[in-house]
Image: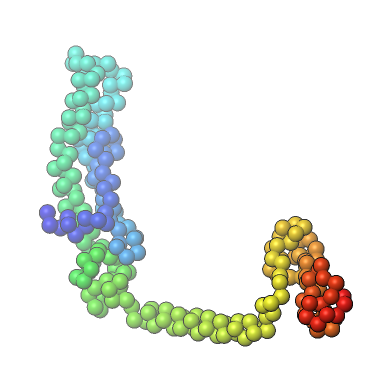
Amino acid sequence: MTTEIYFSDNYRDLCEQHGTGAGFQFEFSCARCQDTWRSPFEPYTGGRVAGWVSRGMSTAWGLFGQSANTVSNAADGLAGAGYGTARDASFQRAISQAQGHFNRCARCTGQVCDRCWNAEQGICLNCAPDTAAEAVAARRRGLNDTASERAYAAGQQDGQRFDVRTPRQLVCPRCRAETRGGAFCPDCGHQQAQPDACASCQAEVPASSAFCPSCGTRR
């Protein structure tokens, strides 16, 4: 069954062996976009008959003098007798049908749907992306990259005017909100502690100092 290998990692087994819903169905997915296709449901008669027998046991304790356990075992045996063979045959039919909905890429061997298939090149869009789509994406990347570079350059210019030597209180001592270095808290309006500047030389003067440590001017 060599065709099964082609769908070894992109299908789900939805088969049911027992009950009134017993039957065979498989779901195949595109290796690129993950869209799915399901094979038509094929009922499994053996499993359905077993379900009917099991339900009958709830109203009849025995069948032809046999115990409930014996009947249950017989029902399970009926459901499982030909299940494996029937499932394999159904799977082969499902694969044959799925091949009409998927394309196998000769380069990466992935199974992809028609939307993810580059028919002109004969391989999937992962291996041979659409030229027009790639051009649009590349143009957008170029726009974003250039805008980022210009914004970075503008930030560098603004950084030249930023006083990096001035201490800034980043958390308000009253309400613990972030101040982002502002002179007043944006949440409670509390004035943040700012070092005094010397009236003579504008140097920073510690709060405990009576004289400017730079020029000696009295505060």
Residue at 27% across / 16% down in the picture? 61
Please say if 90 is above or below 56. Answer: below
Q: Position of residue 74 (x, y in %)?
A: 18, 25
State whether residue 9 is above or below residue 141.
above
Which residue is at the front of the view, 159 or 71? 159
Left or right, 195 with reference to 145: right
The image quadrant that residue 184 belongs to is bottom right
Quarter occupied by residue 16: top left
Residue 54 placement (x, y as % from top left) = 27, 26
In this orientation, which residue lies closer to the viewer: 48 or 8? Answer: 8
Q: Is residue 145 above or below residue 49?
A: below
* Figure coloring: rainbow
Q: Residue at x 78, y 80 (%)?
A: 214
- Is 156 positioned to the left or the right of 81 in the image? right
Task: Say if 175 sits above or below 77 in the image.
Answer: below
Residue at 87 percent across and 77 percent down: it is: 218
Left or right, residue 124 beside residue 198: left
On-image quarter of the N terminus? bottom left
Q: Is residue 86 visible?
A: yes
* Residue 13: x %, y % from top left: 26, 48
Residue 219 picture quarter:
bottom right
